Each structure stands twice: as structure tokens, then as C-alpha cells.
Amino acid sequence: MALQDKLIDALGRFATTFNSYRYIMAIKSAFITLMPVIIVGAFSVLISNMVLDPKNGLASFSSLSFLAALKPITSALNYATLNFLNIGAVFLIGIELGRINGIKSLFPGLLAVICFICVTPTTVEMMVDGQMHVVKDVLLRQFSDTRSLFLGMFIAILSVEIYCWLEGRKGLKIKMPDTVPPNVSASFSALIPAIITTTAIATFGFLFHQLTGMYLYDAVYQVVQQPLERVVQSLPGSCC
């Protein structure tokens, strides 16, 4: 029993220390805020498949076939929640980490989203009528849903940390006259740190792609996220 108590105490201390890290605190707070969004998205998927699906749901019965016409409602809910979950997570992690670092505004969250999009490919190649076409200025679903979650968390933390460090340097702040409203003065004060941060992240993504031939998404997904998915989907992972 003494050994068990020591083990429980050790695990408790580890959990307390782990939860005290500011990055873990920011991620935890962000996902607590996102919990209703996740539940709404899961609920829409459940209703769509169990009730409104014309092949496998209640809508497959002739007397309830009219329910299939309502499926676009749940499809819209799913698209607006789960398919954009990563964008919301990046935004909220940026806000929470900014607050931990002493910045109370929402700007760190917006900056995190901007930096994430800076390292995300916005072109896609599509085969149409046997010819390859390049479509520009698009954001694929794999970059806005949970498949880019690890990259989103990494970029959010990196960009906000850089911004907060630069924001603390007095030499980088644009000083406005006292007659200027505080919110306008704060915007100009954040201008140079924001420019440096976004430029640094965009340059980092560009150089990584030029040197490796891969985007950051591909590297993070193959090295981190995909192995974790295999562990979870394996028999030992499914039993946990």
C-alpha cells in the first residue's frame, strides 16, 4: 500500500507540474472554450447519419423519406464547426497564451491565425478533363479541420511567443501623442512587432518548403500526428 501511495503522490505531482506549464494551460483553456463547438459538430454528425441519411438512417424508410431533404442543415453545422475546428483552436490558443504573457487584447489570437495561414499552402492542383489545373487562393479542408491541429498549436505558440517578446521591447513601439485614444495608440504600438512576427513565420515556412520540398503541414503530420493516430487506432490504443 505504501508503494501505491508513493506512486499516486508522484503521479499527482507530475500532473500538477505538467498542468502548470503555460503552453499546456493555454491549450487546455482553448479546448475548454471549444467544447460546445465540438459537441454541436458531433451532434450534427450523429443526426445526419442516424436520422437524415437516405441510405442508413431513418430517412431510408419510405414514410420518413422527407427527412432526407433536411440533411443540408446538419451538413452546414458540421462544416461550420468540426471542419473549422483548427482555426478556432489556433485563435483561442493565441488569446490564452497572450493573456498568460500579460497581453489582454484579442490581437494575439488574430496574429496566430494569420501566421498559421502564412505557412499553409493556398494553391491546389486539380485534374479536369484530363488536364492539370492549378487553383489559387484556396484553403483546403485538411488545413482547417483537426488534421492540422498539431501544426496549428505549434504555430500559435511560436508566433505569440515571438510577438510577446518583441512587444516587450520599448525600442520597437511607435509612441503616439497623449491626445491619441489609448486603443489607437495600442494598435500602433503593436505594429512593428506584428510585422516582424508575421514576416519571420512566413519566411520560416518558405525556407522549410524550399529546403525540404515539403510544407510544414506534411512534416508535422508525418512525424507527429500520423504515428499518434496509428497508436490510438491500434488494438492497445482502442482498449485504453
Image (cartoon, helix red, strand yellow):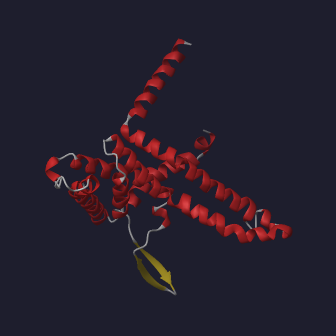
To which quarter of the image does residue 47 belong?
Answer: bottom right
Q: Which of the image's four quarters has the C terminus? A: top right
Question: Going by the picture, which residue comes out furthest to the top?
Answer: 2
**Looking at the image, which residue is at 31% across and 52% down?**
159
Q: Toward the viewer: 115 or 29?
A: 29
Judged left or right of residue 170, residue 207 is right
Note whether residue 20 is visible.
yes
Q: Is residue 37 above or below residue 235?
A: below
Q: Is residue 70 above or below residue 16?
A: below
Judged left or right of residue 223, residue 83 is right
Judged left or right of residue 68, residue 14 is left
Residue 235 percent location from the top left of the image: 61, 44
Q: Toward the viewer: 157 or 236?
A: 157
Residue 118 percent location from the top left of the image: 33, 63
To which quarter of the image does residue 24 belong?
Answer: top left
Judged left or right of residue 99, residue 168 is left
**Looking at the image, which residue is at 60% across and 66% down?**
76
Q: Which of the image's four quarters has the N terminus? A: top right
Q: Toward the viewer: 137 or 166?
A: 166
**Looking at the image, which residue is at 43% across and 44% down?**
27
Note whether residue 150 is visible.
no
Residue 46 percent location from the top left of the image: 68, 56
**Looking at the image, which residue is at 53% across and 46% down?**
231
